[in-house]
């Protein structure tokens, strides 16, 4: 009698590698060949994964057409099978897959559009979290301010691209051919902030300087270090905006930042 783990590994071989011999040896032939039974599960497995990719990447699908998308999805599913039963998390690597997919080489913006769609998908399905209680910040000692490292809301992310992928994404989803034709791919880079609001997921453009400042904050760098590298930005106002928008849910005090707190203060004075 095989163990549960042995059965699971055998079924995985059948579903992912299309190797039925081991799993078939455990199945009783009762009017339907074991290989036929396994193919039913394999088809369902593939159908569910393909549907998960369609739901996460609607703009990519419309950009390349159904036949191209289904073909790419089939290859991706074989190379990158899921590691979790939670299919809302499946497809995180699809953008990276498209970077190296030869048939997509002519669509230089496709992978970046996929990255944006995954950020939107991530924001949509992120867990709920209460915004940071600002009274906790107000209660800190002045000497601790430079040591603060923020924890971003699970729905918040930043991404950049060399062309206006947000405009492409919106035009494709709206099926606005005129807007799509008017997009200048050489218009320069875009810096984007993605966040889930009460009204839905928002994709907003941000100037490069504030974007880089936000990237340091969201990465958990100590506040003193982040402020000291902010240059001519109005860093306090930007920080206040992030807090007011609920983009942080917690903070910690970084002990490693204590030794740089005094020099950072000197640089700002």
Image: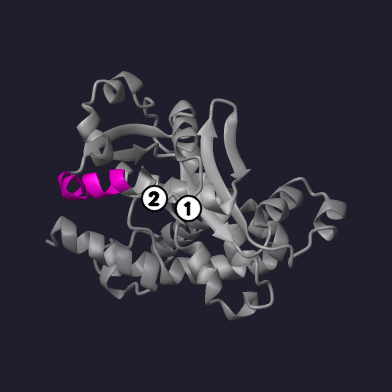
Tell me, yes or no, whether the highlighted magenta stretch contains residue 263: yes
Q: Residue 212's mark?
A: 1
Q: Nearer the viewer, residue 229 or 61?
A: 229
**Horizontal side of residue 121 vs 264, given as left or right:** right
Display coloring: one colour
| Magenta portion: prevailing SS class | helix
Where are the magenta residues, as a range?
255-266
Judging by the rendered image, the residue that carries numbered circle 2 is 216
Locate residue 211, reporting x and y percent: 51, 49
Q: Residue 63's mark?
A: none
Residue 120: quadrant of the picture? top right
Q: Residue at x 43, y 30 (%)?
A: 243
Taking 54 as reference, is 258 above or below it? above
Locate residue 89, reporting x and y percent: 42, 49
Q: Residue at x 23, y 45 (%)?
A: 261
Tell me, yes or no, whether the highlighted magenta stretch contains residue 27: no
């Amino acid at each position: 009698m095989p163990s549960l783990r042995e059965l699971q590994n055998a079924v995985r071989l059948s579903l992912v590698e299309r190797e039925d011999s081991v799993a078939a040896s455990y199945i009783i032939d009762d009017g339907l060949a074991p290989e036929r039974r396994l193919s039913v599960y394999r088809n369902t497995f593939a159908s569910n994964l393909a549907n998960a990719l369609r739901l996460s990447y609607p703009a990519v699908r419309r950009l390349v057409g159904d036949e191209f998308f289904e073909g790419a999805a089939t290859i991706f599913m074989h190379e990158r099978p899921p590691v979790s039963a939670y299919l809302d998390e499946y497809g995180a690597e699809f953008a990276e897959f498209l970077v190296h997919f030869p048939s997509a080489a002519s669509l230089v913006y496709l992978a970046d559009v996929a990255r944006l769609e995954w950020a939107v998908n991530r924001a949509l399905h992120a867990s709920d979290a209460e915004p940071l209680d600002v009274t906790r910040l107000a209660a800190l000692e002045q000497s601790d301010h430079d040591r603060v490292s923020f924890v971003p809301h699970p729905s918040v992310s930043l991404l950049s691209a060399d062309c206006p992928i947000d405009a492409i994404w919106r035009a494709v989803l709206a099926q606005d051919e005129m807007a799509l034709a008017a997009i200048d791919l050489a218009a320069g880079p875009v810096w984007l902030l993605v966040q889930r609001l009460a009204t839905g997921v928002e994709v907003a453009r941000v100037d490069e300087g504030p974007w880089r400042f936000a990237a340091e904050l969201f990465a958990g760098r100590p506040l003193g270090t982040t402020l000291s590298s902010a240059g001519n930005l109005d860093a306090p106002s930007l920080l206040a905006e992030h807090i007011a928008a609920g983009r942080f849910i917690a903070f910690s005090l970084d002990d490693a930042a204590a030794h740089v707190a005094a020099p950072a203060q000197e640089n700002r004075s």
